[in-house]
Image (cartoon, rainbow, N blue to C red):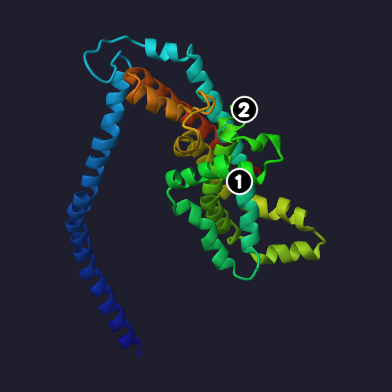
Amino acid sequence: MSTLTQAVRTSTTGERRSRAPRTRSEHRRAMPAYYWMVWPAVIAFAAFHTLPVLVGIFFSFTNYAGYGAWNFVGVSNYLNLFRDDRVLQAYGFSFLFAIVATLLTNLISLAIAMGLNAKIVGRNLFRGVFFVPYVLAILVIGYVFQFFFSNSLPKILSGIPLFRDNILTNPDWAWTTIVVLAVWQSCAFAIIIYLSGLQTIPSELYEAASLDGAGAWRQFRSITFPLIGAFFTINVVLSLKNFLQVFDPIVALTNGGPGTSTESVTLLIFRGGFSGGEFAYQTANAVIFFIVITIVSLFQFRVLQRREADF
């Protein structure tokens, strides 16, 4: 019996030794194929992303209007941005809109996700329904919302002075319609993220908390929210970043109006850079905006991840 066992072990060891060189050789043959698949993607990314970014940064130090001759002007474009009231107003509007929309999106999405995560009838159907806004073209839906705000809403709420007239023409409240559209569309993605986080929480924790007499709010504060902290971080960072770059909802609803009251930074860059003869100036604005978004995102990660560690 021992001789048979030794023979089996010797045979197995021999097979492993004979198989090892073939595995290494196969690995060597696979490496060229790996590079052939990766390099086209790297080249395409460099050609359509990295190179245009570098060219844009180069022209931000010129007075190029998008056509004709140009000269170097140094950092004057960057300095003029901080003295431009229209640019500062666009940044103020973008941050106000992004903060409000981010708060509403995460509050509404978390509440809906917790409801869908509960054992309710037809919850899979509701999950699909709530995700529909994310797959629809926001520009097309924006024109539907525009008709609703400008035609239907004044008739439905004719007794309320704010909605009696077209709210899209009100410079003080037109931005709220953009918030409604953006939050309606963005909640779909946030709900899916929160649902993924809620499904990772063991049900035994809630059962133990119930036995200890913890209520719904206590369970949320001590169990649910701490354990979905990473998912909350992802949603908040992505929401704020995307809302700072808001473009399509504004074009569909107000086109930056009335006047420039709902003009975001991205819309200002688009208008001035492509049709306003300010290519270099708005390119400098785009560079500053990229730096601002990067700093804000890193700051969010630092603060929110620290909060996760505290839990």
Q: Does 226 appear above or below 51?
A: below
Q: Is residue 130 among the parts visible in the rendering?
A: yes
Indicate left or right for 56 with 247 as reference. left
Q: Secondary structure at mark 2?
A: loop
Q: Earlier in the sequence, mark 1 or mark 2?
A: 1
Foreground pick, 292 / 163: 163
Foreground pick, 20 / 29: 29
Q: Quadrant of residue 305?
A: top right
Foreground pick, 236 / 121: 121
The disc labelled 2 sits on which kind of residue? Asp
Q: Secondary structure at mark 1?
A: helix
Q: Does 153 appear above or below 206?
A: above
Q: Residues within 10 Å of mark 2 (few under 14, many from 20)?
A: few
Can you name the residue that lies furthest to the bottom here? Answer: 1
Q: Quadrant of residue 306?
A: top right
Q: Quadrant of the N terminus?
A: bottom left
Q: Does 134 appear above or below 291?
A: below
Q: What label does residue 172 carry, if any?
A: 2
Indicate left or right for 83 with 61 as reference. right
Give how far across and how far down residue 12 sits, in percent.
28, 77
Tell me which residue sits at (24%, 74%) in the image. 15
Q: What label does residue 170 carry, if any?
A: none
Q: Nearer the viewer, mark 1 or mark 2?
A: 2
Give how far across and how far down residue 196 sits, in percent.
54, 58
Foreground pick, 233 / 138: 138
Tell me which residue sits at (21%, 16%) in the image. 68
The disc labelled 1 sits on which kind of residue? Asn
Residue picked out by circle 1: 106
Indicate left or right for 172 with 134 as reference. right
Q: Residues within 10 Å of mark 1 (few under 14, many from 20)?
A: many
Give how far across and how far down residue 99 sits, in percent.
59, 34
